[in-house]
Image (spheres, rainbow, N blue to C red):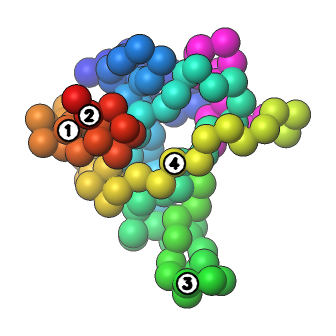
Amino acid sequence: MGTPAAGSCRVLETRGKRILTEFVCYCKKKYIYVWLNTGLNGNHGVQCPNKDCTHGTIDPQTGQKIGHIHYRVIKNGAITKERFNESLPIVDMIHPMPSACQEVPRKLGLIAKARQLEAAGLHK
């Protein structure tokens, strides 16, 4: 299911400059599926939608629990081995829907894939 990518995420599908990736949140071991924009060089952040994660924090404005952030660096259209590069800007911050978080790694069904495409603005 997909090709391995750097930094503990796998590339599952490509649509133009967007790639569907699978991240692993090792706190309570959950799998997160998001689209990254490889057209943007820099740090890409994914706010963890794993509601069981103990690494989260409380948003001071809303009082709601928010997940920690998984970072990946994209340079020249590819995910690098770096998790975060202090010399590069944060170019994208993604807030996935709870449905992006799964208990086991699996191929996304048509409905889950459609929801992720819609969240990324790629739905036709």
Q: Does the residue at mark 4 contact the one at mark 1 (Cβ under 8 Å)? A: no
The kind of residue on which mark 1 rests is Ala
Q: Nearer the viewer, mark 2 or mark 1?
A: 2
Q: Which residue is drawn at 47% across and 54% down?
A: 95
Magenta region: 70-85
Q: Mark 2 and 3 residues: CB-CB less than 8 Å, in contact? A: no
Q: Which mark's residue is nearer the viewer, 2 or 3? A: 2
Figure check: 72 above or below 41: below
Amino acid beneath label 2: His
The outermost residue toward the bottom is 63
Q: Where is residue 31 in the image (x, y as percent from the top left)?
A: 35, 46
Alpha carbon separation for disc pair 2 and 3: 30 Å
> What label does residue 72 carry, if any?
none
> x%, y% of residue 91?
68, 38
Q: Earlier in the sequence, mark 2 or mark 4?
A: 4
Residue 68 sits inside the magenta stretch = no
Give the residue type that dot 4 points to: Ile
Q: Name the residue under label 3.
A: 62
